[in-house]
Image: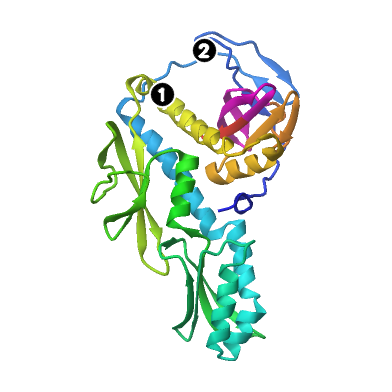
Amino acid sequence: MAVAALFVVLAAATIGIVAVSADTPKGAASSASTSAGTTTTSGPVTPEVPCGIKSTLTVAAVDEAAARLIYSGELGGTETRADIGHITTSSALLGALAENNQAAVQSAVHALVYAPAWHIVRLRVLKAGRVISDIGGPYIIAPVTGTLTWHGKTVGQYVMSVQDDVGYVKLETRFVGVPVEIYRNGSPLMGTVSRPPRSITDGQAVAIAGGSYQARVLDLKAFPTGKLQVALMVPKPGPAAQKQSCATIRLTTWGSIAKDIAARFRPLAPHYKDLVSVLRATTGFRAYVTVGSQRVAGEIYPRKLPASGNVSLVGRTWSMFSWSPSPGVRIYLLTSP
């Protein structure tokens, strides 16, 4: 899945923010001030309630949300829609179907799958329910189906995908950052776990290299039908992390994913806008980049970006995670509290 497949349009909203300074000590009151639509609230900070035994479930919920968003991009992202357009407007394919020329259909499908600038990993073409051509890899996820028409008449159907199991595992590993294993018919197919369990269930405890993990199992569509199971092996947070609130663990986990994604852009500076788009698509949240006092990527709202704390935007309260990947540069991610 290319970066272009993750681009989304961000709608700007004209609204102020409410920020709590990250430098305010717990239990202390901060001074009230207003500036350019920004209000810093005053009042004591509520002590954190330890997340405890819920900490693993909290991390798992974030990892699963990111995994599902990545999968959704494979089903209907920018690249998927573009490749559907290539298929449904291919005069070579449509004309061959209209003429019942099976050899020409095979040639057209081969050209579509192996076009160097596109990312169709498998394409199956049918006519009247019969497979005419099927080219691509063996283990494919996220199939998309549609109808092929030529001069207003239906000449066939297609099943296509832009992602295989290997590519999806790579994305999960690089973006979510946890061990992943794909299961087919209840047995391990491929992944990053050297000795995966022979079978897997959601919530199952798994030991990997001496560490304690919990499996989060997702059902994905297989090509052309059926399903594959993806098991995210979520590490159990340590004692220190369990003393934090569930909200803090949730924020930190989203922040870890954002950092992993940013680390994939090398060099980062020419790709700030790409990063914001990928973060939006992978997390579902707004992201921003500033260099010095200048905002170089992300919406113009909110006007002020606190390094941490709570932010009010479009009628909701968000939690801010930010970090500085290099001197003078700061990346921000608004997350659900």
Residue 44's disc number:
2
Q: Residues within 10 Å of mark 1 (few under 14, many from 20)?
A: some
Q: Is residue 205 left or right of residue 64?
A: left
* Magenta residue check for 273: no
Residue found 60% across the figure and 89% down from its top: 98
Residue found 62% across the figure and 74% down from its top: 88
Tell me the CA gap for discs 1 and 2. Answer: 17 Å
Residue 104 lies, with reference to residue 248, above or below; the image says below
Residue 205's disc number:
none
Percent of width and height locating residue 318: 56, 32
* Element on which disc 1 rests: loop
Q: Is residue 218 left or right of residue 13?
A: left
Percent of width and height locating residue 173: 45, 43
Q: Is residue 119 left or right of residue 143?
A: right
Residue 123 lies, with reference to residue 317, above or below; the image says below
User: Which span is picked out in magenta?
Assistant: 305-331
Q: Quadrant of residue 274?
A: top right
* Magenta residue check for 308: yes
The reply to whether residue 255 is in sight is yes
Of 165 and 89, nearer the camera is: 165
Tag 1: amino acid? Ser
Residue 245's disc number:
1
